[in-house]
Each structure stands twice: as C-alpha cells, then as structure tokens.
Amino acid sequence: MGVSCSNLDKDDSSSEKDAPTHGARQHNGPSSSQSIMSKSVSGSQAFKPVTPRAQTRSLASSSPHWEDVQAARLMINAQHDVVNARMAPLGLGSDSRPSPPTPVDHFSSLEHYQKARNQIRTWEGALAFDYRRTQLASDKEKEANHIIQLLRQRDKAEVYGREPPRLGHDNQKHPRFPGDHFLSDVDLINRSDLYRVAKMMPKGAHLHIHFNCCLQPRFLLDVAKRQPRMFIRSDKALPPGDDLAFRQCEIQFSLLAEGEENLGDIYDPTSYTPGQDMLFTDFLERFPVEQRGDPEQWLEGKLMFSTEETYNVLQTPFGAWEKFNGRTRMMKGLFNYEEAFRLYTRAVLQDFVNDNIQYAEIRPNFMASNILKSRDGSVQGGNRRTVEIIIEEYDRFQAEKTGGYFAGLKIIYCTPRSFSNKQIEDALQECLRFKKEWPTWIAGFDLVGEEGMGRPLKHFIEELLQFRKDCDAAKVDIPFLFHCGETLEIGSDTDGNILDALLLNSKRIGHGFALARHPYIMERMKEQNICLEVCPISNEVLGLTPRINGHSMYNLLANNVHCTVSSDNGTIFRSTLSHDFYQVMVGKADMTLHGWRQLVEWSLQHSCMEDRLRAEAERRWEGLWDKFLDAVIGEFKSVLDWKPES
C-alpha cells in the first residue's frame, strides 16, 4: 500500500472553518498562493509557512498542476499544526521544539543537506503513532528497547542466518530472514529470543479472536477421541494408497445420538458414499499408519494452513478462504457439545493468562441453527446455553485460578454476513435480548464471514438503523464492531463497507486492511475515535499481503490511526497473539518497544470495558509492564556483550 494520507491527528482540531472555499478555479498566480500560505498556525510556536521551491514558483498560474500544488501546501501546513499540537502536551515549549522543514532551492554543503534531511525525519516521526510513547519513555524502557533491538540483530544472525537457504525456481537460493512468510518461519520464530520477549510482554486486551479457533488443534482432538458417539465423515473415500484423496478431502466431525448415524467405511472406495459416518475410534484404529503416519498428526494438518497451499503462486484470497471455510466446518463438530465446550472455554481462559493477555472480547458465532449437544449426542440447547456455559466457566476459572491477572471477558455477538435481512433482524433482536439479560457480558454486534462473498453492510442498513433505535429505547448501548476492509477489492461494494462502518459509527473495525486506500474516510474515522483490530498473520495467510512488511497497518500507523493487535483464528494459522506481536516488530525496521506499548495501551482504551474496570485494568497493567521491563533487562542483558560475526 503506497497510499499517501493526510496525517491529521484525531485529537487535534482541523480548523475547517478557516479553509478557503473551493469553487471554480481561480488563476491568481503567486499572490493567491501567498494569501493561502499566510494562514496563522495553531500552537505556541510560530513558524514560516511553506514557501514554493524554484520549480513550483516557475509554474504558471494557468498550469493544470497549480491547484494541486496549493492544496499540497495547505496539507503540509495543516500537518505542521498537528505536530505543534502533539508536542505541546509533552512539555516541549516553543524554544525546544525543532524547526519545521522548509523547501530549499539548493544545498550549500553536505551539513546543510543532512540538517534538512533530519528535520523532515523528525517532523514525519512526530505524526506517527509511537511519537508520544517514544518521547515519554523512561530510562528503563529505553534500556529494555536497546536490548530488544540487539536481540533482533542476534536472532537474525544466529537463528535465521545459520539456516540453509530455501531453494526456489531453478534452485535459486533464498536466505532465511525474519519477516519472511510466517508459516515458513514459524519454527524459527519459536526459537528466537524476540519471540520469548513477546510472550513475556503484558499485552492488554485481545479484541479480535474467534472463539472456535483459539487453541491448537490437538486439544479438541484429544477430547473427541474420548467420546463414544463421536463420528467422522469425509467428502470422498480414503483408500490408503490414494495420496490425492488424503490431501484434498474435507473432514467433518459429529457427535450423534443413537440411530442418527449413516454408517460407512471411509477406507473402502467401493462402498463408501461421501458424507457417511464412521466411528472416530474405528477411524483412528484402522488409519493406515505405515503409509500416512500418525492419524492425529494428519488430522492436525487438515486443520491448519500449510506453507505450500498458502504461498502457492496460483493461490488467491478466494482460494485461501475456500480452505479456511473447510477448516472451520471441521472445527464445528469438535466444538458443539457441552463436555468439549466447557473444557475448551476453561482452557482458552488459561491460555489467555499464559500468553500474558489481561482481558479479552471473544467472538462466538450465533445462528438459529446452533445446537449444543450432550455426551450421548442429544440436543441440550442453542445460543442461550452457549452464553450460559461461557459465563459459568469464566466464574469458575476466576474463582479457581492460582496465578496471573485476568481483568475480564466479554462476548461480541457475531452472525454471518451471508444471512438474509430477516435472519439479520432476528439476530439483532436476540443480541438485544441477551444484552438485557446479561448487561455486563454483551460487548457489541458484528457480522462475520468472507467479506467478498457475503452481503455488504449497505444491504442491512434498515435493520441496523432500527436496531440502534431499539437500543436507545431500551436504554442499552450495544456498539457495532464490524468486520470490514478485509479485502483487496477496490471500488466494489465490499470496499464500500469501510464507508458504511463509518456512517454507522462502528466503535472498532475488524481488520480495516483497505482503510489506507481511503484517506478522507481514514481521517473521519480518527475524528470519530474508531480503532482498528489488525490481524497481521491472518491477513497474510488469507492472501492480503505476501509478507508482514507489506501490511497496510504500517501506512495506517504512520498516520496515527489507532490500532490494536489480534490473532483472529490462531488454531488455523498456527499462531498466538505473541506471534502477531512478533510479526509487528520484525515487519518494520524501526519498530520499537515504545510502539509495542502504544498498541497495547490502545487495546485497553478502545475495549468495551466499563470505565471502572478499565481504570483498574490499566493500573494493574502498569505494574505488569514494569515487571516485564525488569525481566527483559535481567534475562537478556548478556546481549549487550554480543558482537556480530565479521
């Protein structure tokens, strides 16, 4: 994303009332430019307005570029206003603030050039997301950051640099490096010191995580093989010698009551009809180990993206989503019975604590067709029972946990964007009923699923506006937390979801990858205090960017768009939130600990926690952060003596 954006800070006034009226072209030449450039600037420091360089001064007033040049000058001066406004609260008086850069016709010396270069870097940095935290960094934070930057260098040399290169087309050698394809690097990442630091870091709030994809696959498979009524089915027979069938098949699980099964032998191509059921225990016992290896490892592989399918030269976002949807269908039957759901909920909460997450807003899928089964396969309940069990297991977890701080959990009511208007209306009404019954638990409402294949937000405007009226009448607040901008499409209805999310005043945006292509909407979102839930690994695996350094979040962060970091569907991507924070660091050469801190702080500030709970969580987080700094300095200080091999 090479989009140039305006960088107006959402906390600063834009002085729109002072802007000139834009109507018919006025070819007034330089005098018009001087009039525009003589605007006064906000803040306590006055500076000379931007003056034209020789090449722009030579433009005739009739030039087709003249108005563009004038507009650029207005934008630059507005950015100077923003920088002044950002510096003032940090105690940088007018005497200590750097002078703004001004265009230069020519440079008298190398020193003169370097000074101008440094000025521009300083002012551009002052517009970015991490400026405040960098300026306020304590000595301890600076020391920890120095250690982290050295760890990055050492990891690159000693973890990645010592691996043999991968062979590409015509055996071209490709050296290993941090920030390469995540699924290619994940085993190296897990060996790195920077990843250890990421795991240690208190991460604040996890705001974008789909509840059916939080843990590594082995957990639910282990529960499933203990169920006497668990069945497995395939969309094709699996003869032991058929490599293609084992690679291409889609697997599903079902816990079935007595008499519900339609039995078939998956391994017999002469008799098996796709979709027939086989006892899971029989499947495991008869699995062709000699040809296929361990059956549980094979099933784990079916649930996770592989390097080959993700980065294949012909792969597209649509193809990646096809694989993704098959995996979520496979997960569903491992998840929708009470024993597994309870165990899973407790394990997810413990996993949050283990990954140093202090608060989470989970996204279960709610549909009228949802069922939650008993051990014998009989139906026990649906959406309502799902919420009850989450609350029950959370309460037990908080009462019984022996270590780690966890501030709280909330539920974002999610339903598929592929549904009809009537189905969405019904889902909105159920969400409202749940909010009335469990007011502290329901965080907001979202529409989920493949954005390009579902209906755009504008398709449901009538239902969503009525929902807002219903919430006002009931005196409850259920913010919208829409998935949108998770697309490479440009100018389509899918791309337009960004605009509708803005108009519907979504509190946060899930993904928002496309926002960097919409500079005006981006500024409006900043003005409305809308935060993005960025999911770097998810966006890479699902085809929005080939590598982390191409992610649009860096464009957005350079424009001070508030973002949080989330894992989305960690089960399927072989990832945790620590992996996403790792990727955020290695994807940008000048990313620092101070940038990490800003992202974490925003996660708490933009959560749906009540004010009292948020204040307590922020206070506790500050203490955890200080301990984290001590741990980094104490555990990794030896890197200060490290010298790269010559």
Image (tube, grey):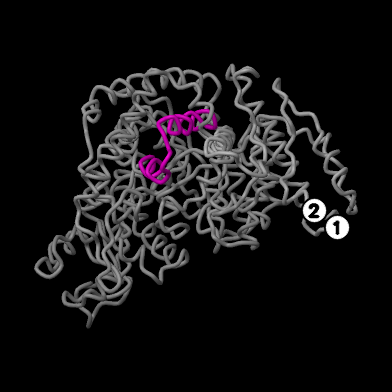
Q: Residue, x 45% and y 47% (percent of image)?
A: 535
Residue 597 on the magenta span: yes
Tell me if 249 is positioned left or right of 438 in this view: left
Looking at this view, name the residue that lies furthest to the front. 108
Establish if 415 lies above or below 292. above
- Front-most of residues 8 and 399: 8
On the image, the x and y values in percent for residue 109 come to: 55, 39
On the image, the x and y values in percent for residue 485 come to: 57, 53
Tell me if label 1 and label 2 are in contact, CB under 8 Å.
Answer: yes
Question: What range of the chain is rendered magenta?
Answer: 580-607
- Front-most of residues 603 and 410: 603
Q: Which mark is residue 66?
A: 2
Tell me if 236 is positioned left or right of 603 in this view: left
Let me know if residue 443 appears in the view: no
Give the amino acid at mark 2. Answer: Trp
Q: Secondary structure at mark 1?
A: loop
On the image, the x and y values in percent for residue 253 come to: 31, 59
Tell me if 583 is positioned left or right of 454 in this view: left
Q: Residue, x 38% and y 70% (percent of image)?
A: 313
Q: Which residue is mark 1?
A: 62
Give the amino acid at mark 1. Answer: Ser
